[in-house]
Amino acid sequence: MKWSGRYSGYNAGTLRKDLISGCIVGIVAIPLGMAFAIASGVKPEYGLYTTIVAGILISLLGGSKFQIGGPTGAFIPILLAIVMQYGYENLLVAGFLAGIILLLMGLLRLGTLIKFIPRPVTIGFTAGIAVTIFSGQIAGFLGLQNMERHEYFFENMREIVLRLPSLNLFSILTACICLAALLLTPKILPKVPGSLVGILVSTLVALWLFPGKVATIGSAYGDIPGGFPGLHPISLTWDRIGTMLQPALIIALLGSIESLLSAVVADGMTGTRHNSNRELVGQGIANMVTPFFGGIPATGAIARTATNIKNGAVSPFSGIIHGVVVLLVVILFAPYASNIPLASMAPILMMVAWNMSERKAFAKLLKTRTSDTVILLVTFLLTVFTTLTTAVEVGLVMAVLLFIKRMGDLLSVDKVLPDRENLREKVATHVVAKDHDCPQVSIFTVDGPLFFGASQTFADLASIMESGPDLRAVILRMGKVPFMDTTGEAHFLALVKRLQGIGASVIISGIRPQPQRLLIKTGGLNVIGEQLFFEHTGEALNYALKTLNGEKCRGCRHFAFRECSGFSGSEYVAAPGSQSSPRVRSGQQPV
């Protein structure tokens, strides 16, 4: 059999590599799946079902050869908030709707647009999610009892302080054992998943040395059922759809960002390229199917994808195997998972939070002290102290507004004149001086996009362009204006009409295709006059000089242009040591 596409060149050797990597990633995913589910406010088995169903479908249908899908830490604050506010059943509805949104994004080929989300926003909310996850595990680490979960950070911190008298030393010991295993295993046994070792060792210690002294998955959530995940019908009504649409949009946005970021990381590790639109389609289908098995929203998992690659994966088959491995463990060993202490889950999630915190990138952006720093801090603080929905919305709006301001600040309009010291007499700003400037013809270089964010700045320059009562022509050099929108066009034509109103012609040189097309469509070309558009500044200047008032030129000693000597009746002589100072030749008297 000849394989093609993502399975090109597949053989028995590559199958063996996929089997090894799939088994290892499957073992890694088991404790993480349960931990993510518990932290999200649902039963641990739902995290395992998500790992099985979504993991297999994302690998089978996605656009990356190495992507491992499943529940992730990034979703914890969102899913917990949804469960607390709307309940578990509505979480399934939100996950299903998010799947539809992701599917549509992929079919509409919007995968590349996700890459345009500003980095300060992604780093800000990722770091905020990490803080939320870490702080949410403090109670589990300390073994605090009768904890009531709240939606907001300060309320949860207050709850922890109030429950401190109930801390359980056995829980702290269990959590410390698991944490030590997490830290030491990669150094001693780098090929063995630290989370699995931490769970096994801490569970065995708790069972043998102080049985019944710490809360377990079984005591908190009941036994984990074995066997295949059963179908879990979800109730879709128009009221529910309307209520859960906004949470679904946030799940879809975060899921698309995380999955494509994970795919990019995989590309960097393997030298391959993923298909972003196909990846979104795969993510969408997986999230549409998973709720019908009771699973929670899933996305690409960066750490598990990296583990998959490091252990020799060569195709999406490794991700499928990882899901099958988790399924076999659920069928064969689910009852034993009920003995896992909840305190063992806390350090695992704390490590996840630490690893996803983007601490180095966060510190680097802080040091820049630019507008990006403001966006970063606002997004981070809003993620921690309000909701991820608010943080993302405010962060994106701020990024857009600050970008518009920066682009608007790029627009500049400078008065220029031909430089006599330059062999080709190119125009320059430094040539313009009080005694070396034509009262009748002004030349301006416009540099930057003329759009709604900068148009008012351009309009404010009208008074500068109106240099005096003798003004006959204004040349606008538009070769450095790459873009013009309708707002910019409106302000531009307002300036043209204002100059025309005082008797000055507006002459355009070097206009780019896009602004020219817009002026044609809006009729602006006719307002200015088609005959007043020139390709080069020299041609525009020759036309402008024909409009001069000869009486005003006679005796003028500004000598702004080479032709001025003939118009003035005097002769231009550059002063010694000066680039452009005009002088009247001796023997001639100024008028």
Image: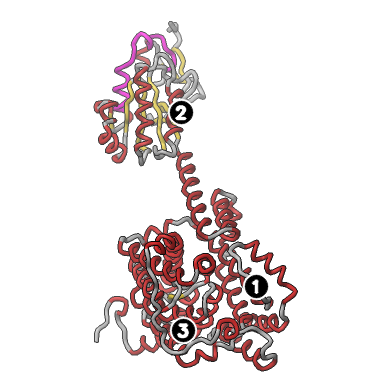
The image quadrant that residue 478 belongs to is: top left
The residue labelled by disc 1 is: 147
Q: Could you say whether the residue bearing mark 3 is in a helix, strand or loop?
A: helix
Position in image of residue 483 (x %, y %): 36, 41
Which stretch appears magenta? Answer: 538-558
Q: CA distance from mark 2 to mark 1?
A: 61 Å
**Mark 1 Cα-neighbour bin, 10 Å: few <14, some 14–19, many ≥20:** some
Colour scheme employed for the rendering of this structure: secondary structure
The residue that disc 3 covers is 26
Q: Earlier in the sequence, mark 2 or mark 3?
A: 3
Task: Find disc 2 in the rendering and name its residue.
Answer: 460
Instruction: Locate residue 133, reporting x and y percent.
Output: 58, 69
Q: Quadrant of the N terminus?
A: bottom left
Rendered image: mark on residue 222: none
Could you tell me which secondary element the residue under label 2 belongs to? loop
Residue located farthest toward the right when viewing the structure as drawn: 165
